[in-house]
Image (cartoon, rainbow, N blue to C red):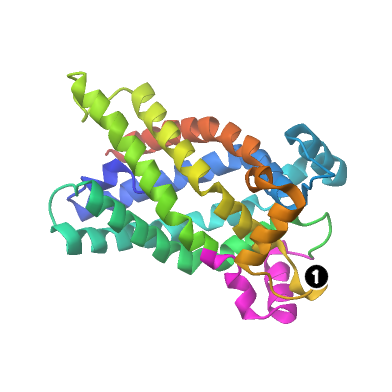
Amino acid sequence: MVPVDVLEVQSQSALWKFLLSGAVAGAVSRTGTAPLDRAKVYMQVYSTRTNLLSLLGGLRSLVQEGGVRSLWRGNGINVLKIAPEYAVKFSAFEQCKNSFCGVHGSPPFQERLLAGSLAVAISQTLINPMEVLKTRLTLGRTGQYRGLGLLDCARRILEHEGPRAFYRGYLPNMLGIIPYAGIDLAVYEMLRCFWLKSGRDMKDPSGLVSLSSVTLSTTCGQMASYPLTLVRTRMQAQDTAAKGPNPTMSGVFRQILAQQGWPGLYRGMTPTLLKVLPAGGISYVVYEAMKKTLGV
C-alpha cells in the first residue's frame, strides 16, 4: 500500500524524492530476494500432490537447470516495472485522496483503504502485461528466449496467444486487492493504536517498530489474498498455444482443489513468508538511506 511518509507530503517538490527513494528501495529489495521469489513461482506452478516441491527442492531444481545465475531470472522485468507502478499508484492515490477527503491532512482508515485500493487497482491494470511477462520469464528455461528475453517473450505471446493474453490473471489480481489492502491496513492501524496507547509519539517511532509493523501487516495481508495470487500466477503461466483453451479463474480453482486439495491453495507460501522480513529490512534501510541522501 501507500507509505505513511507520502500521505503527509504537502510539497510537490519533495514528493518525487519520496517516490525515488521508494523505487530504489524496491529495486534493491526485489533483487536481494529474487531467488526466493523465483522458487515461489516455480512451486506455485509445478508442485502437485504427487510431486510436492519443497523450498530446497525447488531451488535445487532451478540451479541444476540453469546454474546459480538462473535464480535471478525474471528479476529484470520485476525491477523495471517498479517505476511505472509507483508513479501511477501514487498519482492515482493523490487524486483519490483529494476527492474523498480534501487536499490537506492524512485521510482516516476508511478513506485511506478506498483510495489505496483504487490506486493499486489502477496501477495493476496498467502493469498487468508486465506481470505476465515477469511470470513467463521467471518460469523460462535456459536459452528459451533469444537475445533480449523480454522482447522475444512479448513477441511470442502476441503472435501465438494474442493481446488478451497480457491480461490473463487480471480478475483474481483485482479481487485480491481488497482482502490484502483491508487486512494490511487494519493490522497496521491496530499496531499504531497500541503504539499510541503506550504514550509514545507515533510521528517518530524507532526503526524496529516501523519495520515490525510493516512486516506483520504485510504478512497478514499476503496470507489473506494468497489463494487468489496463486490462481493469478497459474493463469499467467499457462501457454494456451501449447496447453489448450484459455484458463478461467474458476477452472484453475477447481483444478487445484481436485489435484491438491485445500492445502494446494497455499502452495509456495514458505518462500513467500521467508522473504517478507529480509525484503522489509532491505527496503527500510535503503529507503531511509535514500531519504537522507536526497535531504528529506
Left or right relative to 172: residue 231: right
Q: Which of the image's four quarters has the C terminus? A: top left
Q: Give whichever of 178, 71 is nearer the camera.
A: 178
Q: Is residue 193 above or below residue 241?
A: above
Left or right relative to 28: residue 155: right
- The image position of residue 120, as x and y in percent, is 40, 58
Is 165 within the magenta?
yes
Q: Give, as a three-letter code, the residue at label 1.
A: Lys
Q: Residue furthest right?
A: 64
Helix, strand or loop: magenta stretch: helix
Q: Residue shown at 68%/60% (left/top)?
A: 254
Is 189 within the magenta?
no
Q: In which quadrant of the rendered view does residue 232 lie?
A: bottom right
- Secondary structure at numbered mark 1: helix
- Res. 287 in view: yes
Which residue bears the numbered disc 1?
Answer: 243
Q: Give whichever of 262, 281 is nearer the camera.
A: 262
Judge the density around disc 1: few (<14), some (14-19), many (≥20) Cα neighbours within 10 Å: few
- Res. 72 in view: no
Q: Give whichever of 31, 276 is nearer the camera.
A: 276
Q: In which quadrant of the rendered view does residue 255 lie?
A: bottom right
Q: Give whichever of 242, 28 is nearer the camera.
A: 242
- The image position of residue 208, as x and y in percent, is 38, 22
Q: Residue shown at 71%/42% (left/top)?
A: 39
Q: Residue shown at 23%/54% (left/top)?
A: 111
- The image position of residue 229, as x and y in percent, is 57, 53
Q: How many marks?
A: 1
- The image position of residue 201, as x and y in percent, is 18, 24
Magenta segment, which residues?
A: 146-171
Q: Residue shown at 39%/33% (left/top)?
A: 289
Q: Is residue 211 above or below residue 126?
A: above
